[in-house]
Image (cartoon, grey):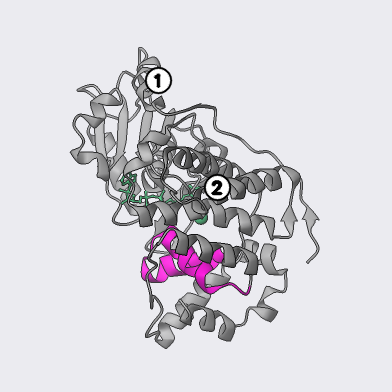
Amino acid sequence: MTTLDTGVKIVRNVGRFTFGDGAVAGVADLVASKRSGKSQNAVFLIDEYFKGQKDIAGSLGAKSADAVHFISTVDEPTTQSIDELVAKLHSSGHSSPATIVGFGGGITLDTAKAVSNLLTNGGHAADYQGWDLVRVPGVHKIGVPTISGTGAEATRTCVMTNRETGLKLGMNSDFTVFDHVVLDPSLTSTVPRNQYFYTGMDAYIHCIEALAGSYRNAIGDAYSRETVNLCRNVFLSTDMMASERRSDLMVASYLGGCAIATSYVGVVHPFSAALSVVFGLHHCVANCVVLNATGEFYPEAHAEFRKMIELQKIALPQGVCANLTDELRAALIAATIKHEKPLTNALGTNFRATLTDTRIISLFEKM
Ligand code: NAD
Ligand code: ZN
């Protein structure tokens, strides 16, 4: 396939970042530095995993007048879950905090980004699903990832599902980018192995898709190549969770997020989005299920993925698409082909000539 040098229009990167084991100790000072005359309080959105950890909010700099919410990770963010959280903040007197801290995985980071935009822009989360619909900057926000791979700490989007319309789309905007990101690899030591692999592979998959696509640019390619190299360091090593490997993966996640801000994904993400919308499968595990079944599109990455998953002894869900009904088949096809940009990137503008309904379903049936 011929590639097209698309260049890079305008990309906004994270304002500032801190990196290194122990960097999380600096969050409290960062928060304190944002408190000013008119906005004294702060909002802390913390992954529910940390609920049992003694005084987690206090260690991040929370004071008694601040709002602390633990974010459930049972479901990925919905426009409704975001609206509910924003309503709670308004009613508790936290409408214009000095800063918002998002501490957790992609779900929590995306929630922090969406809440920040809504507190200053008003309206509902669904109003901003799309490109450049956010009108004014959100509240200052600090992102602290505690699991690596999605790149949510670096991107200009926050993925949300709108259950009413079935639309899974974020607020793609320069205003969605974190003002400050704190990258501390020591935070990821407690992630369960399977989850560590699934989420980490999101960075790998974003970048192998980008590098195999036709819409390309030299900056996106450079970010992607280094992300893939770092993921190989991690997942082809004997101990993917050794401290140096967790550091590699945190960097891969960040660079992968930068890659995706300047390039496009491919076939895996549209199929994965369909599994999420139709069966509620979470994004990162769904990606792994899809790559496992779609070797025909990415033969080399597929072989490498198989090597990684066997080496790390990771279990993948089986029979995800067993017992498909006609209704489910139609829903899966519709939810896949609506992602025209990545499918065009991977297969060309005429992608439906080769990606027929029959082929789509036979791929899902392998999952
Ligand atoms: P997650 O937020 O789904 O969390 C996964 C699990 O790991 C949860 O059970 C969580 O509690 C747990 N966890 C997190 N940190 C932990 C720790 N240190 N120790 C133990 N357990 C821990 O994680 P994810 O896979 O990073 O995020 C997926 C989300 O990211 C999806 O909603 C997806 O749509 C979104 N996403 C966003 C972007 C973006 O650019 N904004 C890109 C890709 C994916
Ligand atoms: Zn992804």
Q: Is residue 290 magenta?
A: yes
Of the pair 150 and 233, the residue shown nearer to us: 233
Tell whether 50 sits left or right of 232. Answer: left
Chief SS of the magenta region: helix
Q: Is residue 124 left or right of residue 363?
A: left
**Residue at horizontal 62 percent and vertical 82 percent from the top:** 356
Residue drawn at (62%, 75%) of the image: 296
Q: Which mark is residue 154?
A: none
- Is residue 252 in view? yes
Q: Residue furthest top?
A: 37
186 or 238: nearer the viewer: 238
As drawn, is 226 to the left or to the right of 307? right
Q: Position of residue 220 (x, y in %)?
A: 68, 46
**Which amino acid type corresponds to the residue marked 2 in the rendered image?**
Asn
According to the picture, the residue beneath numbered tag 2 turns out to be: 233
Mark 1 lies on a secondary structure that is helix
Residue 144 in which image quadrant: top left
Q: Earlier in the sequence, mark 1 or mark 2?
A: 1
Number of labels in the image equals: 2
Calculate the distance from the C-alpha at mark 1 to the C-alpha at mark 2.
32 Å
Vertically, is 162 above or below 10? below
Instruction: Tell me if residue 162 comes above or below residue 290 in the rendering.
Output: above
In percent of width and height, residue 228 lies at 60, 50
191 in relation to 59, above or below = below
Q: Residues within 10 Å of mark 1 (few under 14, many from 20)?
A: some
Q: Which residues are magenta?
A: 268-296
Instruction: Report if residue 230 lies within the magenta region.
Output: no
- Which image quadrant: the N terminus? bottom right
Residue occupied by mark 1: 30
